[in-house]
Image (spheres, grey):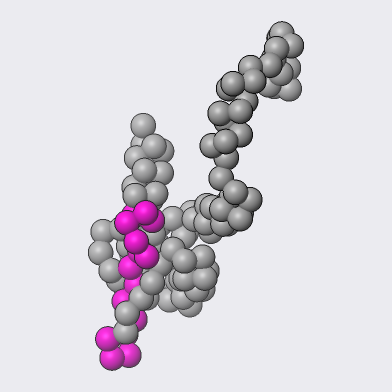
Amino acid sequence: MRTASQEDVCDASCLHPAAVGQAKAALPDERCVEQASAFLKVMADPTRLKILSALSTTELCVCDLAAVVNISESAVSHQLRLLRTGRIVTYRKEGRVAYYRLLDQHVTTMIRNALDHAQE
């Protein structure tokens, strides 16, 4: 039986320069990779993913989000602070109430795709 490390290594020693060149040319710059990695890390938390899923349907205030994901308002506020810092959610104030929503269509698409993929 092969181990995982053996499966990750080519059986034959060959190099495909055209394919390697094409793959290297397609790599994003280091700054972009770091930002995308940070974006994915922020989303990679079950509580935050629930919040993001709820926000993918409509904008919600902190108390409504707390009711949806069944955690305290304080815990929701903490998670929203991380999501705002990560540029994943934004909010608008109406009087004393802040209504949160996903920042843009890219975030909405990422959340839906991740959840669709998990359901397959």
Residue 120 image point, x, y percent: 36, 32
Q: Is residue 70 visible?
A: no
Residue at 33 percent across and 68 percent down: it is 101
For the residue pair 91 and 14, the one nearer the viewer reads as 14
Q: On screen, 120 above or below 16?
A: below
Judged left or right of residue 15, residue 56 is left
For the residue pair 103 and 70, the one nearer the viewer reads as 103
Residue at 52 percent across and 56 percent down: it is 39
Q: On screen, 119 above or below 10?
A: below
Residue 18 image point, x, y percent: 59, 21
Q: On screen, 59 above or below 34?
A: below
For the residue pair 81 and 1, the one nearer the viewer reads as 81
Residue at 26 percent across and 59 percent down: it is 57
Q: How many marks?
A: 0
Residue 59 image point, x, y percent: 28, 69
Tell me the quarter of the picture where residue 97 sits: bottom left
Judged left or right of residue 18, residue 49 is left
Residue 65 image point, x, y percent: 35, 69
Tell me the quarter of the picture where residue 70 sits: bottom left
Residue at 28 percent across and 91 percent down: it is 95
Magenta residue check for 103: yes
Q: Quadrant of the N terminus?
A: top right
For the residue pair 27 and 40, the one nearer the viewer reads as 27
Boundaries of the magenta span: 94-108
Q: Is residue 116 visible?
A: yes
Task: Return the residue found at the far bottom.
Answer: 95
Magenta residue check for 53: no
